[in-house]
Image: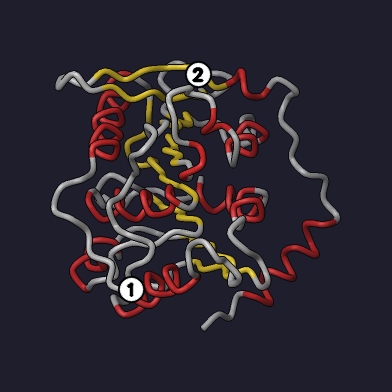
Amino acid sequence: MNHLAAQEREESSQDADKADAEPPANWAKLFSSEKFESTSGKSLAYRQMNPSTIADGERYPLVLFLHGAGERGQDNQAQLKHGLREFAARRDSFPAFVVAPQCPSGQTWSLISRNSDQQRLPADPYEPMSLCRELLDQLLEKLPIDPDRVYITGLSMGGYGTFDAATRWPELFAAAAPICGGGDDSAVAMEKLKSIPFWIVHGDNDRVIPVERSRQMVQGLKQAGVEPMYHELPGVGHDSWSAAYSNEAFFEWLFAQRRSR
């Protein structure tokens, strides 16, 4: 299934000689604490990192980052635990707005079950995902964001959320990077997803979300006529995000993508 295992080992060997990108000691403070208020009266807490310098007349990418199930809550803090440190470390190399909402306790980004072999997306988004879309629309209006460089990534529950959002609004995203997730692998969904470049990562020893969930999505995309970037990590369990977000090639790929007009 996977011709990328050898590539992963080669990239890991190459990266071993490089110093890891390090954020400033107080990197978490780069993410301001914010709260989105919907016209319906619902709210969504989120953290936001801005480019270090915003030049007049310049527009910047936006990354929507969706955390995993363990980071749900109301503290607007837990979602900083995984992945965002790596974005902070590359703030100067890849200036962008990085937005990380926090899913409330007991809720999720997508209603697709990780335990179901047949993955089908409900007609309407779950409330946290609907609020994410409203938040994005507001930010696109008020911030100097390049609408052709809006990206989405997420891990575990956020990987499911990444596939969910990309399937619902494929016209919005220039690229998607779901880590150890899954989604609707129907032909109808693939027709929507095939216009988006994907970078998909999953550990082949994942006991929480089976690697078959990513394999199904990759196979569906191939059948739709596109070739996603798929990195299946040999011997890696559920934590495939550490390797994914520490891979410099991922950031270079992500920020090179532009939405087709």
Q: Amino acid at mark 2?
A: Ile
Corner quadrant of residue 178: bottom left
Q: Which residue: 48% across, 69% down? A: 210
Q: Quick check: 12 left or right of 159?
A: right
Number of numbered discs on residues: 2
Against 67, residue 39 (above or below) is above
| Amino acid at circle 1 | Asp
Mark toward the viewer: 2 or 1 = 1
Q: Residues within 10 Å of mark 2 (few under 14, many from 20)?
A: few
Q: Which residue is painted at 38% across and 50% down in the image?
A: 162
Judged from this view, the residue extending furthest toward the bottom is: 1
Residue 244 screen position, x and y as percent:
61, 54
> Closest to the observer: 213 or 65?
213
| Residue 42 rendering spot, x and y as whole percentages | 23, 23
For the residue pair 45 and 98, the one nearer the viewer reads as: 45
Q: Position of residue 49 (x, y in %)?
A: 52, 24
Q: Quadrant of residue 80?
A: top right
Depicted 222 relative to depicted 107: above or below: below
Instruction: Give the structural element (helix, strand or loop) at label 2.
Output: loop
Asked which quadrant contains residue 89, the reply is top right
N-terminal label among 2 and 1:
2
43 with respect to 61 (left or right): left
Q: Nearer the viewer, residue 35 or 70?
A: 70
The secondary element bearing badge 1 is classed as: loop
Relative to 27, 219 lies left or right:
left
**Which mark, residue 117?**
1
The residue where tag 2 is placed is: 54
Q: Residues within 10 Å of mark 1 (few under 14, many from 20)?
A: few
Which residue: 28% across, 75% down?
A: 224
Residue 81 % position (x, y): 60, 35
* Residue at 26% in and 56% down: 167
Between marks 2 and 1, how big is the CA–CA gap?
46 Å
